[in-house]
Image: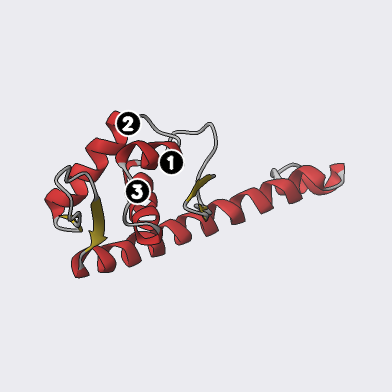
Amino acid sequence: MLSLTGCEIILPFKRHNMEMSSQEIQLQVMRAIELNPRLTQRQLAEVLGVSLGKAHYCMKALIDKGWVKMGNFSHNQKKLDYAYLLTPKGIKSKAVLTTHFLQRKMMEYEALRQEIELVSAKPEVKKRALGGA
């Protein structure tokens, strides 16, 4: 969890010690920049638990797709103050990715629930469930 200017960024679907798919990373990037458009790529990498290079690659891909735009909002000469903003196309894509993500997680949950039920069942129920006599 990263705290920036008193605002904590919590990504509810972040997976610890597991490899995220590119779609999951894209979804998490869009969630993070929606919560804090002024995240640096280094901060984004920290929030996502990925390398700086992976965060940069993903951000560039989202910009190339037209889902995110980068703007320079600094009035000083250093010009280091950037903000990432979701475009209307990005907002729509985020909704689609979120829907697919939740459907996939619901199917995983149901499969795990059934497996737990089977493992927890009495031996005679296990035999019947596995096709035994």
Q: Position of residue 109 (x, y in %)?
A: 60, 54
- Amino acid type of the residue that numbered disc 2 sits on in the rendered structure: Leu
Q: Please name the residue that numbered disc 2 is placed on.
A: 52
Q: Residue at x 67, y 53 (%)?
A: 113
Report how far apart the C-alphas of labels 1 and 2 lie in the structure. 10 Å
Q: CA distance from mark 2 to mark 3?
A: 13 Å
Q: Pick the quarter of the image with the C terminus.
A: top right
Q: Closer to the camera, 94 or 77?
A: 77
Nearer to me, 5 or 51: 5
Residue lying at 14% horizontally and 57% vertically, measured from the top left: 66
Contact? badges 1 and 2 (CB < 8 Å): no
Element type at mark 2: helix
Q: Nearer the viewer, mark 1 or mark 3?
A: 3
- The residue shown at (14%, 53%) is 65
How packed is label 1: few (under 14 Cα within 10 Å), some, or many (20 or more)?
Answer: many
**Which residue type carries mark 1?**
Leu
Indicate the secondary structure of the residue bearing disc 3.
loop
For residue 28, above or below residue 91? above
Q: What residue is disc 3 on?
A: 39
Q: Name the quadrant containing residue 25.
A: top left
Q: 77 or 87: which is nearer to us?
A: 77
x and y percentages locating residue 118 in the rendered image:
74, 47
Q: Which residue is mark 1?
A: 48
